[in-house]
Image (cartoon, helix red, strand yellow):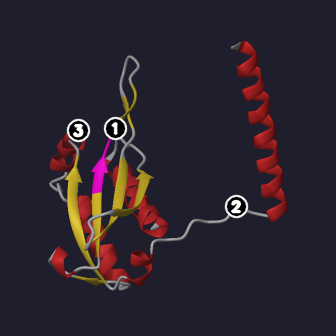
Amino acid sequence: MLRILKIAAVGAVFSWAAFWAWGAQTGAMLSAPVPGQILSARRVFISNIGVDGFSLAAFKKENEVDKPYNQFYAAMKGWGRYELVDNPTDADLVLEIRFSAPIASAGETPAYAPQLGLSIVDAKSHFTLWNFVEPVGGAFRRATWDKNFNEGMTNLIDEG
């Protein structure tokens, strides 16, 4: 059994070395194609997935429970790349915006990792075509939170 593991380990090292050498010779790895629906879409519906339970309290405190949706919608409208429609059946794509703050560390004091998420869904097949996640820096002061949130939203839109 140990001999088989040694042979497998040596084989894995040689395979990795050959793969690395091949990548160095070809310059760069080939990029997978972007789904055609994303490239050809003209009309999009923006879906508000909302915020998780932990984040809800913070957004309620701001009186802006739909802040991620409202800011994303305004940014997309301002961009003008897509016609925004008010019914998903009229859309080529559905853009699902959400905010969550999953626990990143469960030590003595839990640490959270606030993040904006965006899923691009084909309106006809309902398949998710692409996902983006953008971290949002935490903050204790309202001004810092607004700056971090706006920066996260800008990065999410630039990434997408």
Q: Which quadrant holds residue 36?
A: bottom left
Q: Nearer the viewer, mark 1 or mark 3?
A: 1
Examine the structure image and report whether residue 158 is included in the region drawn in magenta: no
- Disc 1 packing (10 Å; few <14; some 14–19; many ≥20): some
In the rendered view, does 25 fall on the left or right side of 92? right
Q: Earlier in the sequence, mark 2 or mark 1?
A: 2
Q: Is residue 103 above or below residue 58?
A: above
Examine the structure image and report whether residue 99 is included in the region drawn in magenta: yes
Residue type marked 1: Pro
Mark 3 highlights which residue? 54
Q: Which residues are magenta?
A: 98-102
Which is nearer the eye, 63 or 118?
118
Number of the label disc, if any, that sits on residue 29: 2
Residue type marked 3: Phe
Query: Which secondary structure, mark 1?
Result: loop
Which is nearer the eye, 58 or 38?
38
The residue shown at (38%, 61%) is 150
- Disc 3 packing (10 Å; few <14; some 14–19; many ≥20): some
Q: Earlier in the sequence, mark 2 or mark 3?
A: 2
Query: Which secondary structure, mark 2?
Result: loop
Compute the Cα span from label 2 to label 1.
32 Å
The residue shown at (19%, 51%) is 62
Going by the picture, which residue comes out furthest to the top? Answer: 2
| Quarter of the rendering occupied by the C terminus | bottom left
x%, y% of residue 29? 70, 61
Mark 1 highlights which residue? 102
Residue type marked 2: Met
| Magenta: main secondary structure | strand
